[in-house]
Amino acid sequence: MTGERCEVVYVRVDGEGLLVAPKGATLRDVLRDGDCSPYTRLTERVNCGGRGLCGTCGVRIDEGPDATHWHDGLAERWGYPRLSCQVRLTEDARVRLPEKVVWGRRE
């Protein structure tokens, strides 16, 4: 060990759960590992694997990293959720998992 300290960020999900993640991790992976998947029953199996192509991992970010992905500009302009697979956690975040009517329910 080189004596480097692992930096972490905290992610508050839907005002309840608190996840701890290594700084620089993708929000999608952190949510899935923390049992707070951004997917529904259907999209858990049918998605693009985190490549930013399908839009099924969308979340609302109330506080957190700045928007940098091309989709974020559309999300901001039209009120879409941001793609959790394209969000790198560089700071603490507060996110909400929106209900996804088109893709089915979470339960």
Image: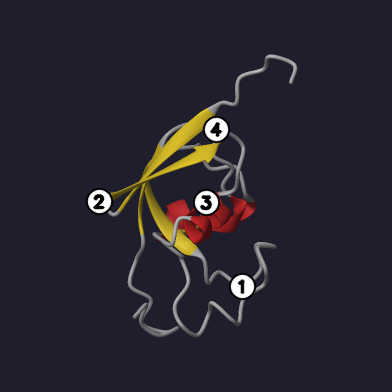
Q: Nearer the viewer, residue 1 or 104?
A: 1
Image position of 63 with respect to 35: above or below: above
Three-letter residue code for mark 3: Val
The residue sitting at 45% across, 55% down in the picture is 34
Q: Which residue is mark 2?
A: 16
Image quarter hosting the N terminus: top right
Q: Residues within 10 Å of mark 2 (few under 14, many from 20)?
A: few
Q: Is residue 26 left or right of residue 39?
A: right
Q: Estimate the x, y position of residue 61 in percent, counting from the top left.
A: 39, 48
Q: Which residue is mark 4?
A: 90
Image quarter hosting the C terminus: bottom left
Q: Are marks 3 and 1 in contact (CB under 8 Å)?
A: no
Q: Estimate the x, y position of residue 41 in percent, counting from the top left.
A: 46, 82
Q: Residues within 10 Å of mark 3 (few under 14, many from 20)?
A: many
Give the farthest residue toward the left: 15
Secondary-structure class at tag 2: loop
In front: mark 1 or mark 4?
Answer: 4
Q: Label 3 to label 4, Cα distance in Å?
A: 13 Å
Q: Which residue is mark 3?
A: 30
Mark 1 vs mark 2: which is more N-terminal?
A: 2
The residue sitting at 57% across, 55% down in the picture is 29
Image position of 69 with respect to 49: above or below: above
Mark 3 vs mark 4: which is more N-terminal?
A: 3
Three-letter residue code for mark 2: Glu
Q: Nearer the viewer, residue 45 or 86?
A: 45
Looking at the picture, the colour scheme in use is: secondary structure
Image position of 79 with respect to 44: above or below: above
In front: mark 3 or mark 4?
Answer: 3
Q: Label 4 to label 2, Cα distance in Å?
A: 21 Å
